[in-house]
Amino acid sequence: MKKLRWIQSKTNISQNTIIKKIKDYPYTEKIGEGFVLQKTRNGEIHGSFIEKIEFSETMITPTNTTYTQKYLTYYTSNFIWLTEEQCIRLSMPGKRTSYFLNRLCETCNFNLLVDDINLSPILWLENLEKTSGIVYSVNQVQLEGIALEPNLIGDIKLKGNEDIRGKISMFIKNANYYPKKITAKTMIDNKLTSISLYANGMAELSDTFNDEFQIQLFKSLKHVTKWPIP
């Protein structure tokens, strides 16, 4: 499975200046963090941010003696900065995303504004269906913030064997709700494939989906989001 996440960005510095600043902060083992610039082209900066994290843990043996175990791990944040689209695309984003974005802002002398995307994954999928011509069957929906009563808010996860988008109102009636995640399936090249879309602009894709599809996915995301950052 591929995991992608789009984050809005805004800066008034040029792409060449951004590239120079990233090159000025390369990864080294001594520093333990930094950037690796992979390639650049007009409107795109491909790179990674690497962190070396060392920590230790003290444990007690059955004989009541203590020993310290040292650990070493690396976190890598792979990104494509789409400078003309005012967007950063993360590949396989993890729990260190916020730290990477903070370091990127510092590298740009804080002349960079980043903002999480907030959208309806249901609308995202519907626009994707229109632009790609592919029909999906939504078999899982995760809803949050359902206002059942003035002082009663709940979350719900719906699952089914068929497309359940039209049945959401049967469960929540006229209550307001916030769709957090949906999972849908379709046939690609005679193979059943799945895709999950999240409200924060993240998508989990089967390996069947190619690069052209990822471009369509991004265009659909922009269509249902306030873009760019004001």
Image: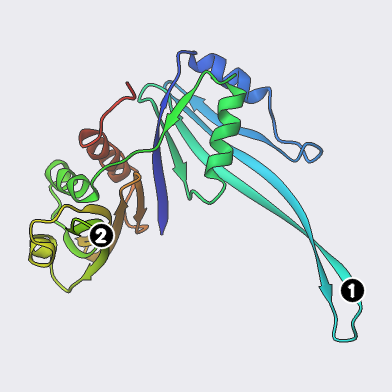
Mark 2, secondary structure of its residue: strand
- Residue 207 lies, in percent from the top left, at 37, 57
- Residue 20 lies, in percent from the top left, at 61, 18
Residue that numbered label 2 is attached to = 153
Mark 1, secondary structure of its residue: strand
Amino acid identity at mark 1: Thr
Neighbour tally class for label 2: few under 14, some 14-19, many 20 plus, Cα within 10 Å:
some
- Residue 202 lies, in percent from the top left, at 36, 48
Q: Quadrant of residue 60?
A: bottom right
Amino acid identity at mark 2: Ile
**Left or right position of 164 against 34:** left
Neighbour tally class for label 1: few under 14, some 14-19, many 20 plus, Cα within 10 Å:
few
- Whether residue 47 is situated above or below residue 63 in the rendered picture: above
Q: Which of 156 and 42 is in front in this view?
A: 156
Residue that numbered label 1 is attached to = 66
- Whether residue 45 is situated above or below residue 89 in the rendered picture: above
